[in-house]
Image: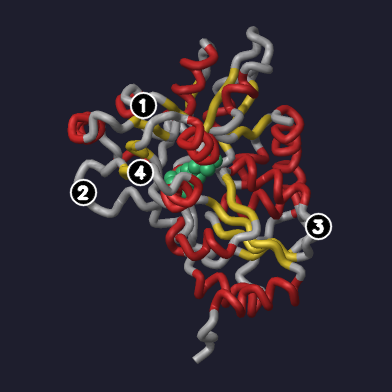
Amino acid sequence: TELPSDLFGAIADLKRELNAVILAHYYQDNDIQDIADYLGDSLGLSQQAAQTDADVIVFAGVHFMAETAKILNPNKLVLLPDLEAGCSLADSCLPDAFAAFKAKYPDHLVISYINCTADIKAMSDIICTSANAVKLVNQIPVDQPIIFAPDRNLGKYVMEQTGREMVLWQGSCMVHETFSEKKMVQLQIQHPEAEAIAHPECEPAVLRHASYIGSTTALLNYIQQSTSQSFIVATEPGIIHQMEKVAPHKRFIPAPPINNCACNECPHMRLNTLEKLYLCMKHQTPEITLPEATQQAALKPIQRMLEMSA
Ligand code: 13P
Ligand code: SF4
């Protein structure tokens, strides 16, 4: 068969041969997290992509993340282990519909969450992530009206934190929408000592029960600083692998979705496997490609984000 018995060793060899860097998101399988050169939230991953001197970027995440890395590095080879690894949130905002939406608000500045396609980025003024959305919106003059797309839950959260009105695109993440207020309350009754923390892609009714809200990296930092010994974690449970590594004596309880299915795991993120990661490096495919005009138009709002969040 094509697969070596020591996948970790074979991937390390290919990394040296290709002068490649492996960038991974926290929602990837544990073994992918363990082999990554850099693991981070969407902001950290973009910053790493912007500054890498590797020749090849192997992106263990979803399509919009790898696409962002390609926009920042048009001359590098950017590999994604499974090209089908999409995102329900990015899919909720298609270019024609978004152009029509934008046309209704011609004087609005467009701030788009990084979880969108390159076409939507190309129609945006500034990109943000969950780590810097509040900070970026606070830098916009108060008399400047804003469209925020595509996540309505993050948008609503940013409106509350900044006191700003924004016009919201009504998209959402299928994973974070599976968490329910009822289940959160039940978990808090079962584990009264546990502190509930959540990602801002959760619905307002879930966020209301969280004592801390932040990006995946912010959540990972928070559990180390907090004096609590146990946490209810309302985001994709891949992050718990890192939480257990950095705080082995603390307890992490994944927030269950409405039915106790495994659907708090992102089905898109989980399409990538260690085997596919090895194969994409071995064959240098599938790679991310983009039309030149889209790449150039999408680069501007990403660069603005990197400048504004520095
Ligand atoms: P962050 O890691 O930037 O918080 O994003 C979470 C997410 O849903 C990525 O798809
Ligand atoms: Fe998209 Fe949600 Fe999966 Fe993140 S967790 S990639 S926002 S579907």
Secondary structure category for the residue under label 1:
loop
Left or right, 45 with reference to 219: right
Q: Secondary structure at mark 4?
A: strand
Q: Amino acid at mark 4?
A: Phe
Mark 2 vs mark 4: which is more N-terminal? Answer: 4
The residue carrying mark 1 is 210
Callout in the foreground (1, 4): 4
Circle 2 SS class: loop
The residue that mark 4 highlights is: 252
Frontmost of labels 2 and 1 is: 1
Numbered tag placed on residue 55 in the rendering: none
Foreground label between 3 and 4: 4
Mark positioned earlier in the residue sequence (3 or 1): 3
List the residue tagged with mark 2. 260
Label 3, secondary structure: give it. loop
Position of the C terminus, as image quadrant, is top right
